[in-house]
Amino acid sequence: MSLSDRPTPDLPSLDATPSRPARAAGRRGFLLGSAAIGAGALLAGCTSNEVGTDDAAAPAPAAEGSTSATGAPVTIGFAGPQADHGWLNAINEQARAEAERYPDVTLEVVEGTNDAAAQSGQIETLINRGVDVIVILPADGKAMTQSGLAAMQAGIPVVNLDRIFDTPRAYRLWIGGDNYGMGVSAGHFIGERLRDRPEARVVELAGIDNLELTQQRSQGFADALAEYPNIELVARQAAEFTVQSGQEKMAQLLQAVPQIDAVWNHDDDQGVGAEQAIRQAGRDEFIMVGGAGSRHVMDQIKADNTVIKATVLYPVTMAASAIACARLIAQSRALGDLRETEVPTSITLHSAVVTKENVDRYLPIAFT
């Protein structure tokens, strides 16, 4: 994903640093959570604005009870991405909005960046300031692993958001989307729509090809389509998560394949460019499925007057969930609806398919 400058947020004053007992509680939570829960818990999330199924039922009301009650003061350090992409910008906004929900949370935000060296320095600063817990979407998971380890060794639990560190020793909790699941969901949606069409032809507009997330999405898509012998993936192009690259690569696909039955586009932002290419080519014989869950795409799904019929979520709510879970970890509290006594060590979000039938449920969490 390409990135643009985002206004530098103001850092809260240092006198907001919480009391030592609150920090000690957070450390205690890390130790017990790692031992008792283990990696791999599969949850829909831990905040009320998340979704766990694809049906059209109304969202669940905000959770009340022990997890929402005000607890010990907590200072959360947040190191997010530089935001020149709609999804990345929404990550930062979700984190801030979630922190404001809690009177017992102070959020120390450092400037969003995609520079691993700069972000490493930011984590060192947060460690030195003595925050209770750090939430980080790493510029590069592998490159930032040492920073996660440093925070953990300093007794500060780390919530690793999305781009995973190299070792689970570098985080107390990992929370993120399911890239392979995105591909599977897109493949099955298209497969069911084309199940009765002989020799159906599908094309794929992928993201940046050397990223593991792109490879996982493509693998999931291929695995799902393999269950439909009448469907063939006839062409694939890798774009760069930008509008310009989406337009360029989609134009190439349209030129190369004269008859298409379905398109899967990995990313709704680059899909804006793909839509331009489709309009310019005057093509509308196929259905198109997006990826991530932008407001722009969901509005089109609801209107049902373009080729776009669905998008597969990569929920931006993961940032809100990360803040909510960081607060609970620092306060040695558990997720309200689970029987566990600690926050799990791994949360993978569901890749729901947003369609005309259920779009009203997901519009509140669409990003712009």
Image: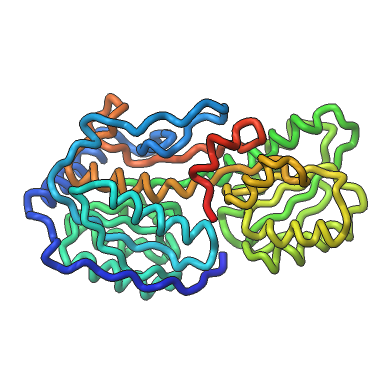
Farthest right residue in view: 258
**Image quadrant in which the N terminus is located:** bottom right
Q: Is residue 213 left or right of residue 261?
A: left
Q: Residue 77: image x %, image y %? A: 26, 60
Judge left or right: residue 300 versus residue 293.
right
Q: Residue at x 32, y 64 (%)?
A: 146
Q: Residue furthest front?
A: 303
Q: Name the residue: 42% across, 47% down.
A: 318
Query: Closer to the camera, 77 or 184?
Result: 77
Could you tell me which residue is drawn at 38 percent across and 36 percent down?
A: 48
Residue 181 in view (yes/no): yes
* x then y, percent, for residue 36: 25, 33
Question: Within the image, what quadrant is residue 131 found in?
Answer: bottom left
Q: Nearer the viewer, residue 338 or 5?
A: 5
Residue 260 to residue 228: above or below: below
Q: Position of residue 16 (x, y in %)?
A: 14, 61
Who is closer to the viewer here, 9 or 19?
Answer: 9
Of residues 228 and 81, which is closer to you in this image?
81
